[in-house]
Amino acid sequence: GEAGKPRDWVYLQNAGRIIVRGERFHVNPKGQLFELTDRYAPKLIKPEQATDEMDAIRTRLIAGLKSVRGDTGMPANRGRRPPRAVYR
């Protein structure tokens, strides 16, 4: 195979929840940045609390989201709940 360009972020979608996450932070389609210091309780970083480094990380993660989801970054179902699976 050919050498690729590894990303430093991953795209996750589960039950209508979409995030792009890096090693220490994740961002949602609204552009909200969360710090992942506590695995079970991500901490929202408000824009006025963000450092220059955090702003750069937010920009990079949003660019990753747009590369996967398009310019809006919003889910295809526009915020509605996804249909429930039916088991027979």
Image (cartoon, helix red, strand yellow):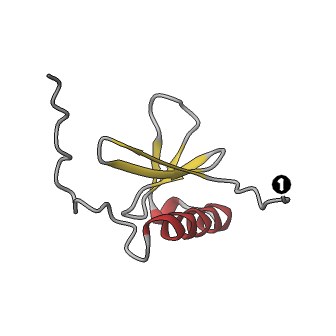
Q: Residue at x 59, y 36 (%)?
A: 37
The x and y percentages for residue 30 are 36, 63
- The crowd level at tag 1 (other Cα within 10 Å; few <14, some 14-19, many 20+) is few
User: Horizontally, is 23 left or right of 76 in the view?
Assistant: right
Quarter in which the N terminus is drawn: bottom right
The x and y percentages for residue 80 are 16, 54
The x and y percentages for residue 18 are 39, 51
User: Horizontally, is 75 left or right of 5 in the view?
Assistant: left
The residue furthest top is 88
Q: Nearer the viewer, residue 13 or 86?
A: 86
Quarter in which the C terminus is drawn: top left
User: Horizontally, is 87 left or right of 12 in the view?
Assistant: left
Q: Is residue 81 above or below residue 62?
A: above
Question: What kind of element bears circle 1?
Answer: loop
Q: Nearer the viewer, residue 23 or 33?
A: 23
Q: Is residue 13 above or below residue 53?
A: above
The residue furthest bottom is 71
Tally of marks: 1
User: Horizontally, is 64 left or right of 85 in the view?
Assistant: right
The x and y percentages for residue 32 are 42, 59
Q: Nearer the viewer, residue 27 or 69?
A: 69
Query: Picture quarter containing residue 70?
Result: bottom left
Residue under circle 1?
A: 1
Q: Residue at x 22, y 59 (%)?
A: 77
Q: Residue type at mark 1?
A: Gly
Q: Residue at x 22, y 63 (%)?
A: 78
Q: Is residue 9 above or below residue 76?
A: above
Query: Picture quarter containing residue 7?
Result: bottom right
